[in-house]
Amino acid sequence: MFSCGEWCAPAQRLDLSLSAPVVLDGPGVWAGVLSSGRCALDGPEGPVSAEAGSLLVGVSPLELTPEGGCHLLAVRITGRVAEAFAAELEGSFWAGGASAPLAAQLLARLGEELPPGEGGGLAFRLLGELAGADPAAPALPPLVSRALAAVQQNYAGLYGVEELSAQLGVTKSHLIRVFRAAMGMPPGQYLTAVRIEAAKQLLAHREYPLEVVASLCGFSGANYLCRVFRKATGLTPAAWRAVAAAPAAPEAPLPLEKELYV
């Protein structure tokens, strides 16, 4: 019998506020995002420090030493895909968020309580995203880290880049310039990508009409959702739903749905 977990599965999730050294251990691949502070990863040539916005990629044991207080969200992924990924790694490292722009969002999803069967697909997509992570990439500028966090926390409520720049206290042109230099794409494109990922989750697990999916994910309407979704994925939302729909919808509401019950 086919087992998704045999190929790729999140085996351990850690949400750590670090003030003392810690060792991440266990089989598989560790992936994480440093959301605040600074932290050092012990390597063969000594500790390597990283700032907020950096991604952690490696195999155990990973020895981490916070430089002051810091926060790390980490997931250990196991299975045959993880084993193959680990075999290609040349040691553990920090990477800049620009080299894997959707990794932080996928890690955030894996850090939640997930319905049965969903974690394996998210873990597989995370490893695919991290395959392009560049160990030499610099840490993200603080403005970009704040912008990423704001988008991930409120992608459905943001009207666009002008509102985002106002929230961050900078001009729209300055945000676009700094964000594009760090991430390789403008903030509007990143916002759309995050919304598309959210729409995929709802389409796979719920039978909501497209107008509801569009509203929950921040799109102005079903027609606009269809146009943007097809451009990004090559499929219509209906075709994606037919391919990706889970055998049974989870009982617990997904995080995206909270506003339905307000």
Image (cartoon, rainbow, N blue to C red):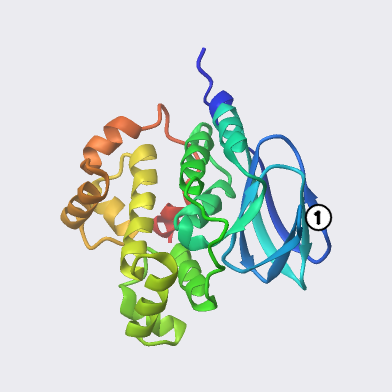
Kindly tell me whether residue 53 is visible in this rendering: yes
Res 66 → quadrant: bottom right
Q: Residue at x 83, y 63 (%)?
A: 20
Q: Residue furthest top?
A: 1
Q: Which image quarter holds the C terminus? A: bottom left
Q: Is residue 56 above or below residue 50?
A: above
Relative side of 102 to 193, left or right:
right
Q: Residue furthest front?
A: 45
10 Å crowding of disc 1: few (<14), some (14-19), many (20+) = some
Q: Nearer the viewer, residue 194 or 242?
A: 194
In this image, 24 relative to 127: left or right? right
Mark 1: amino acid:
Val
| Image spot of residue 7 (x, y percent) | 54, 26
Q: Residue at x 45, y 82 (%)?
A: 168
What percent of the width, then of the height, locates residue 219? 27, 60
Answer with the quarter of the image where residue 72 lies: bottom right
Q: Which residue is mark 1?
A: 22
Q: Is residue 187 above or below residue 228?
A: below
x, y percentage for residue 245? 35, 33
Mark 1 element type: strand
Residue 87, percent across and down? 61, 34
Left or right of residue 18: residue 208: left
Task: Residue at 75%, 71% (x, y): give it.
Answer: 69
In the image shown, does 254 or 86 lie closer to the viewer?
86
